[in-house]
Image (cartoon, rainbow, N blue to C red):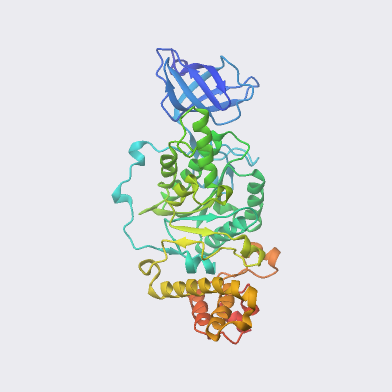
Amino acid sequence: MTQSEAARGQVIGVQGPVVEVRFPPEVQIPNVFEVVETRTHGGRTLSLEVTEHLPGNVARCVALGATLNLQYGAEATATRRTVEVPVGDEVFGRIINMLGEPIDRKGPVGGVQRAPVRRSVARYRLNPASLTGAEPEILETGIKIVDLLFPLVKGSKTACVGGAALGKTILTLEFIHNVVIEHEGVCVFAGVGERIREGNELYYEFVEQKIIDKVMMAFGQMNEPPGARFEAAFTGVTLAESLQERSEDVLFFVDNVYRFVQAGSEISTLLGRVPSETGYQPTLAAEVSEFQERIRQKDTGSITAIEAVYVPADDVTDPAVVTIFSHMDSIMVLSRERVQLGLYPAIDPLASASANLTPAVVGRRHFDIAQECLRVLTKYDELKRIVAVIGVEELSNADRIVYERARRLQNFLTQPFFVAEVYTGRKGEFVTVSDTLDGCERILTGKMDGLPEEKFYLIGSVDQALK
């Protein structure tokens, strides 16, 4: 009896995306997370991932594809391996699914080097010697409001929270554009449970911006089974790790990390697990940690993550959102009010927060200017309600000065994006941290009091307001 014959079993049950496979008593049942392959009635190969062992030498699996036309009694083969995806330069400019198969109609991905998306316990365990002990290194994004209030530290995780049409995709594209062009970096984009239309638009934007050859893309689409959506996040972080091990600094985007949790919840329900008190899977914290803790800085390189987070019913106390936020260093909240006012990027500085905004990370001058900006913007938030009733002329002199400086500052923190030139009609601007701090300081100290606030709208450095 050959090894392949010894590893064969039969499908004995299909309940949606959950498939049960019985193996003969003399055959060793596949381990959890190993792949079992079977074929549907139409001849399509279907990959299954083992999630549980049941009595009677039965492996309970989650399908990584549609189970349509999968028949009772179909032969299933244990591959004795976990899900593996191609890694290396051949993946740049390509779109793959969670199994590493190309979905961009450009033929097979070249190269033979592959990496497992699931870490073994021995490999996953943190080695303190591999972690960097160096000082935090800030990654300059060229986006004023981000560099000022939410500094991007290498190896950190940033959540981008917002609903539809608030500019998450444009902001993502600008991050990628600036890192690739200005820092000659590399990016990995994981589309987890989102619409393929968005992925299609993103791909052609990368082509148009001529940065597609520096981006790897992995997708588990919204119309796919929960197993595929769940696995897409691990596929993305595996690609990022493969670049990190080559001493690259990687910018890793996930859109949307909430869909990863949602897919895990669906799988848990389908497997019949007792839900937690709030209805989510009992393994919620463990699954989020398994993914998030792979994003970190090491001596060989760093993975810096920017993760879009959908907030169900705008409830930031949702258990899944709270669990995700517990792993984040910065949280940027996109505001619909700011979009309506035309303030792009539409990040609400008062609703957002960053653990990296400390003197130890950014320096005392940067910290003091950022805190003064937040103080002025907070005061403006109070005053604008009064102004809406009585008008700005009725404010005291001190309050009126603060109000007008805040308006200038609010406009100054907008800027034209390279990837939005077609919408704004203005050339994109990369603004250094020093120029951002200089501009904010001059506005706050009153050196720009003689200029109308319109001069500060959608500009780069503050000197452009003087023209």
Residue 15 rendering spot, x and y as whole percentages: 56, 23
Does residue 457 appear in this view? no
Residue at the (37%, 62%) spot, across then down: 136
- Residue 284 picture quarter: top left
In the displayed structure, does residue 410 sit left or right of residue 60? right
Residue at the (54%, 72%) spot, across then down: 382
Does residue 120 appear in this view? yes
Residue, far front? 390
In the picture, the quarter occupied by the C terminus is bottom right
Work out whether residue 356 or residue 155 is closer to the camera in this orientation and state it. 356
Residue 110 rendering spot, x and y as whole percentages: 55, 40
In the displayed structure, does residue 150 sit left or right of residue 223? left
Residue 352 rendering spot, x and y as whole percentages: 50, 61
Residue 22 rendering spot, x and y as whole percentages: 48, 16
In the picture, the quarter occupied by the N terminus is top left
Residue at the (47%, 64%) spot, across then down: 150
User: Is 402 rendered above or below residue 175?
Assistant: below
User: Is 106 rendered above or below residue 51?
Assistant: below
